[in-house]
Amino acid sequence: MKPSVARTEILSGLVVALALIPEAISFSIIAGVDPSVGLFASFTMAVVIAIAGGRPAMISAATGAIALVVAPLAREHGLGYLIATVILGGLIQIVLGALGVAKLMRFVPRSVMVGFVNALAILIFMAQVPELIDVPWIVYPLVGGALALMVFLPRLTKAIPAPLISIAALTALTIGAHLAVPTVGDRGTLPSSLPIPGLPDVPFTLDTLTLIAPYAIGFALVGLMESLMTAKLVDDITDTRSSKTRESIGQGIANIVTGFFGGMGGCAMIGQTMINVKNGARTRLSTFTAGVLLMVLCIVFGPLVSQIPMAALVAVMILVSFGTFDWHSIAPGTLRRMPAGEITVMVVTVAVVVATHNLAFGVVVGSLTGLVIFARRVAHLANVTACLDPDGHQVVYAVTGELFFASSNDLVSQFDYATDPDDVVIDLTDAHIWDASSVAALDAVEAKYAARGKTVRIIGLNQPSARMHGALSGELSGSH
């Protein structure tokens, strides 16, 4: 690795580490555990995923989505059960990764991805708003100055990341001028020693497994979905490919290690990943550095880090949110050209994420909405046209389009059973049979003609359609 590349990776990792500290403390509070639990999780997640993960430069740490999943368990049963859930959730992620769950990403429409990115940007911005309410007036010019510094400094030099210079400048200013503003230290006490590995303090019984299993499944699914969506986003930004299967298994390994070290678990952090990528990081070194420096900052430089003004970190995240939002997607020209269904899917995804503060819910609901809209659109593409022979002895019905459950429902009503001649031909040369519903519909058509003493021949089946029709025809009604 070239020295210039290594410098970029390490400096970017330092910026990410600084931004991780208040976030990890916040998520610990959401989960109802000590701040050190979130910070330890961010340390182990980043270090392990840097080695085991499938997407270089992506940051994994304690996250709000995971905190929301485990909070009820931690509140009602304590830290031991939370840690047991993290370990079991990690095992489930490894199994899901090995089974190829990452391949399901191909069913996520582009409009859901755009909605996901935009919702993420809105959530990042919304998370900063509380930091700007009921604070000393000096916080506002500090945030404004930090934003100006990060916008204009890269035009002069990119040797050192602008966010890092901004954080250092605001920290020096607030300490030197003795400004009374909210700081990182106000969020909670930083740990003074490294985490020690150990087993979760729970009885190893079937009752414990029954209690934590539902939380562990939710933990595994939310963590994987957020991580895979983030990996896809980084793939698009960096124009590179990554192994989603390796990432899925890597997330599981990282969560198991995190659990044994007493952390609250985590997944990919989109905000911090965006900071990392926008600062030019492209390798695993930045992720590893972020994790290591997080602990170094807490243990060695804890007193100094505690004095970093929240205004500096708020400014960094506001800039990240504006840079993350896909402004092109809401431009009037884009909206005029985009099909209404695509816009609907994007809006639904954003609305669900913002309402629930859960990116996974938004992706699932958005994808299902997209599938319904797609099914409705494709259903109208199946057409039936009749051609009667001049002598009146035979009628040929030409069926075109995709035959599946949505389109085949109308198929039965497209034929004139009463007045058609005795010889009926259904030509499927320009059609394709996708499911059992279509075979059942064709069986129903044949049955209606047979009841009137008329014969039906089906011709033009392509090979996959012929195989499905041959295997299922006559087997679906239960009356044979």
Image (cartoon, rainbow, N blue to C red):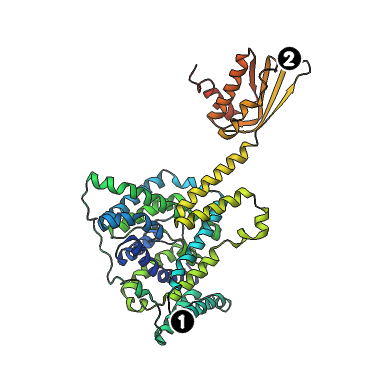
**Residue corresponding to mark 1:** 138
Are there few (<14), some (14-19), or many (20+) residues within 10 Å of tag 2?
few
Query: Does 425 appear above or below 57?
Result: above
Coordinates of residue 363 in the picture (x, y in percent): 49, 51
Coordinates of residue 367 in the picture (x, y in percent): 52, 47
**Residue at 64%, 37% in the rendered image:** 380
Q: Is residue 448 left or right of residue 180?
A: right
Mark yes or no: residue 241 visible. no
Which residue is at the front of the view, 298 or 380?
Answer: 380
Tell me the tag on residue 322.
none
**Residue at 37%, 76% in the rendered image:** 305
Residue farthest toward the bottom in the current orientation of the protein: 177
Mark yes or no: residue 265 visible. yes
Residue farthest toward the top in the current orientation of the protein: 453
- Tell me the quarter of the picture where residue 51 sits: bottom left
Which residue is at the front of the view, 448 or 50?
Answer: 448
Which residue is at the front of the view, 42 or 286?
Answer: 42
Q: How far is disc 1 from disc 2 in space, using C-alphas?
A: 91 Å
**Residue at 68%, 21% in the rendered image:** 416
- Residues marked 1 and 2 touching at CB (< 8 Å): no
Coordinates of residue 450 in the picture (x, y in percent): 61, 15
Query: Does 12 appear above or below 249?
Result: below
Tell me the tag on residue 393.
2
